[in-house]
Image (cartoon, grey):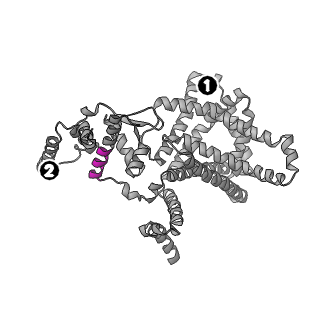
Amino acid sequence: MQFLDRIKRFMSQDIWRKDVERSPFLSPFIKVLRFIYVVVREFYRGELNLRAMSLVYTTLLSIVPLLAVSFSVLKAFGVHNQLEPFLYRFFEPLGPRAEETVQRILGFVENVKAGILGSAGLALLIYTVISLIKKIEDTFNQIWRVKSPRSFARRFSDYMSVLLIGPVLVFSSLGLTASLMSTRFVQKLTSIEPFGTFITYLGKGVPYILICAAFTFVYIFVPNTKVKWSAALAGGVFGGILWETMGWAFASFVVTSTKYAAIYSGFAILILFFIWLYLSWLIVLTGATVSYYFQYPQMINVRPETLTMSNSFREKLGLTIMYLIGKSHYRGTHPWSVETLAQHLELPLEPVSETVAHLRRNGFVVETIDDPPGYLPARAIDQIGLGELLKAIRGGPDREEILKVSSPVEEIFRKVDEAMEETLRDTTLKDVIVDRDGV
């Protein structure tokens, strides 16, 4: 028991001390331990579990419409025969039940016919599929601390691209890989050593490579923010290897869990199906968490309680961000994005993103069409009064109707507001920029 307490104290306290960073030998090891700790911490906080369970429910409602749309697209390109092997590969951890599950799902998909559904049914089918992708995007945005989702126009174009082009690329690559491995040249090369051994191991590693590539693509495309290739690849490799390993472990569990089949009878396959969907989504979200911390290593050293902003910090941060955006626009330089602002201010992404979103909602900044979007002043900087700006930053949701403020307290706040307005009267954002820069 004391040994476990020491480990817990070491992971939660000792590795965060500043003095351990000064050792050239311990520093890399400590950084790796911190990285592992924050990922495990995210898991134990329970949010990933709740999001994974939510996605399981959404997937159950949307899996048949999603496969029906994909099947229609694949059939137009003549690669629809790859759908069944792909599904069997995904449900392979269910063991002997995998084939039965795949056949039932394909039976549901074949029953979905556009002629029978009609226009309204077809529209509802597409809406169900898009809702699933939107749910996944919202979950990834929460992991990446992104406050604003895609616009409706971008959402429609991006989602339709995934639905129409994604299945063709995925199944074409699978078919191309299988065809390449079965060519006469590769077969002859297999009989020559050491090429034969290399090709054998390569064939065993192809599933890992493809699943890691799929995870990497998801981590790049889905979040409404700019994800670096290196960060997406780190999460993709972690998630892909973990998914394949978990699939092997789950398959072993299914084979040895004959008692569950005896207890639940026909419901056993349904329960195993739910569990595997949950584990799959949990692995996907954990890989996304790895990508986030890989891209923003400064967040590793930030404890959750430090993300709570005081009123003074919120005001200074809002004015600083507005000053940087206004100065960039005044000088004609490249607009600031949330990511570049966070890096410049050496702050976590979350408070910067929250502040920019607040300024945008109050009409002080607008987004550019760049990816990721930059930010510009919503109007001329000589028309943005500092008093108006500070009042908007200080303001939050109106709760005065539930707070019974006595008249002396109300008088104090009235005097504070009047003093602020008097001090900042006729002072605009341009005055600060010109006076600070001397231009």
Image quarter in which the C terminus is found: top left
Question: Who is closer to the viewer here, 115 or 174?
Answer: 174
SS at circle 2:
helix
First in sequence: mark 2 or mark 1?
1
Q: Which mark is residue 409?
A: 2
Q: Amino acid at mark 1?
A: Leu
Task: Tell me if residue 97 can be seen.
Answer: no
The residue at 75%/50% (across/down) is 96
Mark 1 highlights which residue?
117
Residue 313: say if magenta.
Answer: yes
Residue 181 makes an appearance in the image: yes
Quarter holding residue 186: top right
Tell me the residue at 53%/29% (across/down): 157
Structural crowding at the residue carrying mark 2, measured as other residues with C-alpha within 10 Å and reported as few (<14), some (14–19) or many (≥20): few
Q: Looking at the image, which is closer to me, 49 or 437?
A: 437
Outermost residue to the bottom: 2
Which of the 4 image quadrants contains residue 429?
top left
Magenta residues span 310-320
Name the disc covering residue 143, or none: none
**Chief secondary structure of the magenta span?**
helix
Question: Would you say residue 317 sits in the magenta stretch?
Answer: yes
47 horizontally vs 434: left or right: right
Q: Which percent across, then down, holds residue 310?
A: 29, 53
Task: Using the image as rendered, state which of residue 397 and residue 9 is in the foreground.
Answer: 9
Percent from the top left, x then y, of residue 115? 65, 22
Closer to viewer: mark 2 or mark 1: 2
Residue 226, percent from left and from top? 50, 42
